[in-house]
Amino acid sequence: MDFLSLAFVLFVGIALILYYVLPGRYQRLILLLSNLVFYLICGKWNLIFIVLTSATVWFGAFILDRISDRYKEARKAPELSKEDKKKIKNRYQNYKRLVLWTVLLFNFGILAYMKYLRVLAGFKGGLLLPLGISFYTFMATGYLIDIYGNKYASERNFFRFLLFISFFPQLVQGPINRYDQMAPQFNEVHKIDADRMKRGVLLILYGLMKKYAIANMLSGSIESVLGGQINTMPGSLIVFAILMYSAEQYADFSGGIDIVMGVALLFDIRMMPNFRQPYFSTSLGDFWRRWHISLGAWMRDYVFYPFALLKPIQNFGKWCTSKFNKHLGRVLPAGIANILVFFLVGLWHGAAAHYIWWGLYNGFVIAISDILEPFFKGLSKKMHLTEDSNGMRIFRIIRTFIIVNIGWYFDRIDDLGRCLSCLGRSVTAFGPSMFVPSFKLVLLNSNEGSPIYAAGGMCLAFLGCVIVFIVSFLKEKGIDVACNVSAIMRKSGFGFAVVALAMLVLISFVFMSSAGGFLYANF
Amino acid sequence: MEELIELLEEIKEDVDFENEDSLVDDGLIDSFDILQIISALNDAYDISIPASEIIPANFNSARTLYEMVKRLQDD
């Protein structure tokens, strides 16, 4: 179901009316039914997969809690020596480990089969990738690992757990929400609030503007360049296409997230934030704490820390400290854990080698920059540079933006050979004088439509980017334009903002050459 | 408690572990520091701190770290 379709608007509208008109105690039921209907509309097979994952994880968590209770009972036995206590602990820990790994392997097995094995084995036809499988599998397994670690009590009611896993706004492209943040909200009774509804509508329109007026406007032009005869193109045009891709990627993904955040807000549910002005990052590590935040946090909590805390990795750290120095003992084990994390982040994006190269590129750059940190600190000291000056901050932001964009080559260009030749041409055959003629030839006279449409689409995207830049810059300064409705209302700008954003979305249809789904919807 | 503070100061010299109570929330310690702290606490107190204990509530101050160590020792 497309977000900008009559079906989706009607679906959300009906769900909202029932949600707020019926007595509060039915709100959970309305939401759960909405989720199931949403899933049925998107394909009945989806429902089987999500119910199967929810049921196995819910039951696994229930068993884990039972084992923990029995362990506590066993520990109460009188006159237990320290040795006995350790034995009891190990025994119950092994039971728990068995349950955890069985459920994890089953669910990651489904994900791996649906997402990778079928693709690698070349199966065509049959079932489509279940909607949101990468997102809900991670949400469900995260919950299970939390219960395994006794972070909070498990959910006793299966339907409440299913409500958390199947909450429809999060299913198209995340965020990967956490149970302990979502469950209390589902248990409350929500009253309608005009300010909040306006905030939700504004956020949805802002997201639609990003998606339709920026991302969709650019995707055809990017394809014209990167899918064309790159051997004859000047590097400057390739760089321009990658810059457009960085705008498209951000507008598409964060726009989609704004829309689903806005929809959730209409139901008075606040989901985990997924973006925090990522292009203002001062390092690649910082970028990954601002871009797809919920995936980064999942990887940190359930892969990075557990892996870095393994005995062999800890011992490796100690060995590095004794053999080399304290700094390497500190950063090398974490660097290895980071490379693993980014390998998985790449893999998570799909069954294609270029995603893995992109992931590894990120992992290695972060690991190397951590290793070289003392060197860079020493260098700036020698050059008498003030670390926290504005100039240094801007330098770092630009440097990080360039590093991120190099990564986009791997992400966007499917074939490694092609990607490397694009990178090569960007450096060795930049040809600035060739930019304008090749721009006219490739972008304005492409097969997609007449030049005026291509140019118009690009101008609209540029205008959209300026708006997003201003909003992001203000947010970075602590002024929340999109969410702070009371400030907007005081200047009676709400109506204006709605009209302006809606106009941009509508104008985008004039220049639209293809419908284009969300880039992140297929993960 | 004093022993624990000494141990923390060895890992990160420029932080006032005695008085700070939002080490994680204020970004005074990062993931490298957390891993180093866990490694040192595991050795010093003969415990094994699992990843599930890495939450700000446990790592925000020397006192909360101390309470976590005591809890894991009794466990």
Image (tube, rainbow, N blue to C red):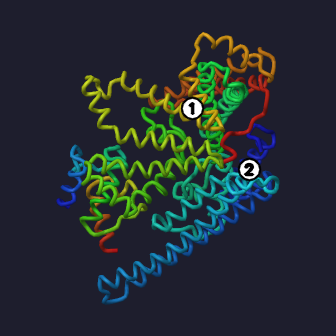
Neighbor class of circle 1 (other Cα within 10 Å; few <14, some 14-19, many 20+) is many
Quarter that holds the N terminus of chain A: top right
In the rendered image, residue A141, in percent from the top left (x then y), is placed at 57, 61
Subunit bearing disc 2:
A
The one nearer the camera, A266 or A25, is A266
Contact (Cβ within 8 Å) of mark 2 with mark 1: no
In the rendered image, residue A156, in percent from the top left (x then y), is placed at 58, 70
Residue A279, which numbered label? none
Q: Residue at horizontal 49%, vertical 26%?
A: A473
> Would you place residue A363 above or below residue A77 in this image?
above
* Residue A14 shows in this picture: yes
Q: Residue at horizontal 69%, vertical 20%?
A: A458
In the rendered image, residue A413, in percent from the top left (x then y), is placed at 64, 35
Residue A15, which numbered label? 2
Nearer the observer: mark 2 or 1; the answer is 1
Give the residue at mark 1. A482
Location of residue B53 (image quadrant): bottom left
Location of residue A157 (image quadrant): bottom right
Q: Amino acid at mark 1?
A: Ala
Location of residue A359 (image quadrant): top right
Q: Is residue A165 left or right of residue A72?
A: right
- Determine the secondary structure under disc 2: helix
In the rendered image, residue A403, in percent from the top left (x then y), is placed at 49, 32
- Determine the secondary structure under disc 1: loop
Q: Residue at horizontal 32%, vertical 55%?
A: A317
Q: Amino acid at mark 2?
A: Ala
The one nearer the camera, A428 or A111, is A428
